[in-house]
Amino acid sequence: MKEKPNDINMLSIKPLRPASAASDTTARYIPTSLSWTRLLLCLASIFLTWLSLLYTKIGRTGAGELEMKTNGPYDSEYPSLGINITYIYNNKAAGPGAAFDPHSHGAYPTEYLPVESFKWDRIKFNLPGNWSANTDDNVIAQSQRIELEGGSMLSREFHVLYAGDWIDGESGNTFTFHFNDGSTQKVELSAKNWWTLHWLNQGVIKAPYHLEASGINHNVTQIYHWSTAIRSDSPLSSITLPKSTWPNHLHVFALSVVPCILQARSLMSVRRAVFTTQWEIIKGFKAYAVEVTVVNPLPSAVASDRDTWHQGLGIVGVVGSNIRTVRHGTLYRIIPSDEIRVKVWVVPTYKTPAFGIDGSFEVVLHDEDGALVETHGRTVFEYSGAFAASSSERTTPEWWEDAKFGIFIHWGIYSVPGWAPGELGWYGEWYNWWLHKWPQPWNGYWKHHLDTYGSGVVYDDFIANFTGSDFNASAWVNLFADAGAKYFVLTTKHHDGFALFDTKGTTHRSSYHLGPRRDFLRELFEAAKAETPQLKRGTYITMPEWFNPDAGRGGYGFGDFPGTLAHNAYNDTMLELYTGRLRNKDYLRDIQLAHMKMLAYDYETEIIWCDIGGPNLTKEFAQDWYPFAESQGRQVVMNNRCGDLPQFDTPELELFSSIQSTKWETSESIDPYSYGYNRATTNDQYKNATTILHRLIDIVSKNGNYLLNVGPSGTGLIIPPMISRLLEVGRWLEHSGSCIYGTKYFFLGAEYGTLRFTQTAETFCIISLSRPENRTLEVDTLVPVTNGDKISLLGGGAAGLDLPFRYQGKKLIIDAPEEAFKEVQHAWVFRVAYNVKHPS
């Protein structure tokens, strides 16, 4: 039986059952396969390991210092039950005769697929015992209803291994859960595809290629994991799969559920512990965050009994080999079936080699008096490669997770014609591509260009009109700050290959060498550093260029990015010049990689926001960039469109109806149709502040960030309708931002009707997207609010403080006076401050 390593969030971390008694630290902590150097280091650390296990301290100093103590038996398993779906298999994904993808008759390579069982995130899945057998091995979801074997059960989590069979984009697929009381729950999965051409998703089973009828496709091909909370107020009896449709079918490989624990009083369990690459200087040491998820595994069916809630200070620490805790995590309340994520900051107990260290640790919980808190089972987690300075595989920085809201800027040559036909997906910044794609009168771009400029004007002629005469870097960055954004991303080079920075000797196709002869990126970043240092600075860069002949000459062209000179849209016998090009360049190394390095080192960007993917040297870039940034005290991030090493997903124009467990960021424009400036859009068509804020709130409640785009004109002017919307958003965030920035999602559900939920360690936020009727907010779903809490309507002034609330049965009712409601527009945020005791 083969089991794939559980490399959760880049580093290998998995539960480890000790070979002998719990006190046998030597057997438990020495890795089984090490180089002699690493073995000697590990042996040298055994004594420190023993001390760490006995004497690790957290949190307090002086009198009353808290010692992290452990007791009880170990348990490496987390309760999960695989659901049998073999009887509804209807597709073959791998092996002889497979046709997972009906478009290309593609198949997974069998040698990369685990057999019989697979464990991910401590969840057990059942898989085929032989992928090469001449039998089906997965289910194309077509509304099949699956009864739970052994009868219904109270369950808190649902997990699925899946993949879509299309190439680009994602598709919504809704699972329906049926309960004994006759009710149902619908949760939407945004399904990722087994491979993608333009960006790289984060799967849990990976193959470096897949098979097609025409040969081998060398794109990374994956199977994904998705999970959701499910109601536990009634036993789960059956599950109906989504009804997927052409061209993107949802394939299900395995299902599993996590049952609840039945007990009459509160209980906590460590769900997972993830070593991150987030770091912070604490007491002179460079400490790294271990993100710990603590759950209350009781069913919500017992939540009316407050004895089943964990309430009061909980102190979370880590005890382990080669590491010690320097700052503990805290939690204050966990209701039945809910989970809380806290960060524990640790440092190595000896000088870390470049390749990092290996070891294991246990998560322990204490109350405010230092007493060990009972947990359901004990788990030791094994880790490898922690603290590695050279690691190019990174989690998102803490600042990015907390920021939530950023500004995207699309500005370039395309801003001069500034036109799109007013249909979603037909972007103004793609003007040059669509102009050439279909040179026919029915093509709106082709006809508009002919009618407006004539057949004698080519796209590069617009360079002379790209003046930037109204560009004011100071005004831009201060507008972004006033809008409440925490970061911005400038499109430094779009697919037309025209850059807004000094490209030096790589190409002269830039604003520094042509047109205005200005380094707009330098001006913007310098203004941000001087005037809005709290704003993180980011750079968009395209990986391919449409018509750069060096790409085609090097064999790097593909699809809509052929890497050849454009044929004139009105005279096919003529080729258009690629103005500013310097000959004899290797596209990947001399242009793409060189430009990424310029942004990283010359301009010190903190976000590399790539687009399209394709052939790349991203891994080579990243292995130097991350250590360089860290040497300057900066933590940087890269999206999933660089072709390798994705840190966060980037769905475009997407809203989801459920929480997405991976980090993600949706981008969209204030303009409803285009990212680049579009003179065809009228003032009343731009998104208003209410729409923008509702989308921000919704995205944040589901674990995402919101990157809102502005498209300045060719002269560099951000037009008044965009400015007014941004300033109005900023005014709302000024009073209600505490329920946006730095928040986490509510595991039991991000939304309920027009309500959205976010939370911090000490607060819970109920955000109503519509004004509550009769000055009363009713919440008819389980939330962690109880007697002694303080509730405020943010932005409601003095009248919005300390609002009265009560329960009618299970329904929470909050009353607020009219004078508080009338002070607020767009969305009404009720912030619940827990009655907590802080660490002394």
Image (tube, helix red, strand yellow):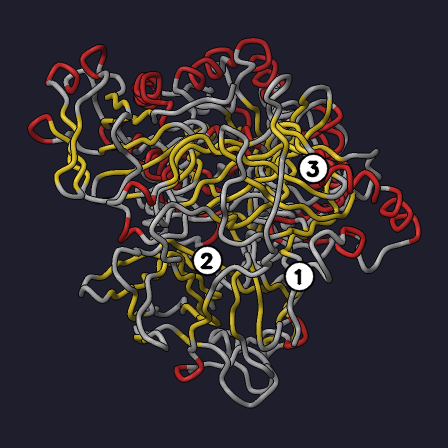
Q: Is residue 85 something that shows in the picture?
A: yes
In screen coordinates, is 246 left or right of 591?
Answer: left
Q: CA distance from mark 1 to mark 2?
A: 18 Å
Q: Which residue is mark 1?
A: 5
Percent of width and height locating residue 518: 61, 18
In screen coordinates, is 826 left or right of 320?
Answer: left
Q: Secondary structure at mark 3?
A: loop
Q: Is residue 708 something that shows in the picture?
A: no
Q: Nearer the viewer, residue 201 or 184?
A: 184
Which numbered mark, 2 or 3, is in the foreground of this view?
Answer: 2
Q: CA distance from mark 2 to mark 3?
A: 45 Å
Instruction: Compare marks 1 and 3 and give the one earlier in the sequence.
Output: 1
Instruction: Compare marks 1 and 2 and give the one earlier in the sequence.
Output: 1
Q: Nearer the viewer, residue 651 or 561?
A: 651
Which numbered mark, 1 or 2, is in the foreground of this view?
Answer: 1
Vertical order, 407 against 622 (above or below): above
